Amino acid sequence: MLLAGQKAVVLAEDMYEDLELWYPVLRLREEGAEVIIAGTGISTSYTGLKGYPLTVDATVDQVSAEEVDAVIVPGGYAPDKLRRYPAVLRLVREAYEQGKVVAAICHAPWVLVSAGILKGKRVTSFYAIADDVRNAGADRVDAEVVRDGNIITSRQPSDLGAFCREIIGALTEST
């Protein structure tokens, strides 16, 4: 198992893109990583865009960057809610500053924008938030996956294979 001993946190809120949350959770678990799904704390369960429910393992304020190797932010409309919570922004910013993998897909770079970690970075995102990403000081490109240091980004559900391969590759480099 490639990721035995690794720990990742996947952030959750209502209206998450179902595939963008579950695909990374299942792929990382398949490779032996411990995966915690953490919500904002307004509820213990959240519903995806397609109606798929999930119960979280923890709240974001119960997770520290020191104890994880990666923070993964799925897309959908959940990122617009996630970015409103200081504990989410703190976790993302601290993980980034500690050199941990910070991965975001689709609309999730909104959270990275609000965490203030995109200036000078090369990233991708869903096309609808390209202006937001550029206005945060990032070089936004159109590619299925982009890695700049410890930040990994992808555009949409069809990029999930490349997104997860890049996350797994980055995590295996850190072991």
Image: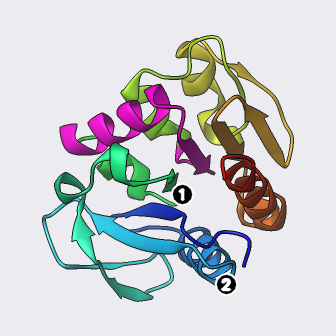
The answer to which quarter of the image holds residue 45 is bottom left
Indicate yes or no whether the magenta region holds residue 87: yes
Q: Is residue 25 visible?
A: yes
Q: Residue furthest left?
A: 42
Q: Position of residue 160 (x, y in %)?
A: 75, 65
Q: Residue at x 67, y 19 (%)?
A: 121
| Residue located at (38% from left, 28% from top) | 115
Above or below: residue 171 compared with residue 49: above
Q: Which kind of residue does numbered mark 2 sit on?
A: Glu
Task: State which quarter of the image contains the N terminus.
Answer: bottom right
33 sits to left or right of 98? right
Q: Which contiguous range is marked in magenta?
A: 85-108
Colouring mode (rainbow / by chain / secondary structure / one colour): rainbow
Q: Position of residue 48 (x, y in %)?
A: 43, 77
The numbered disc on residue 15 is none
The residue closer to the viewer here, 117 or 149, is 149
Q: Secondary structure at mark 2?
A: helix
**Rounded to the nearest whole Å, what is the CA distance between mark 1 and mark 2?**
21 Å
The residue under label 2 is: 30
Query: What element does badge 1 sit on?
Result: loop
**Would you say residue 85 is visible in this rendering?**
no
Amino acid type, callout 1? Gly
Confirm whether the magenta stretch covers residue 76.
Answer: no
- Residue 156 screen position, x and y as percent: 72, 57
Callout in the foreground (1, 2): 2
Residue closest to the eye, 33 or 160: 33
Q: Is residue 116 left or right of residue 144?
A: left
- For marks 1 and 2, the one nearer the N-term is 2
User: Could you tell me if the residues under marks 1 and 2 are in contact, i.e. CB atoms within 8 Å?
Assistant: no
Residue at mark 1: 75
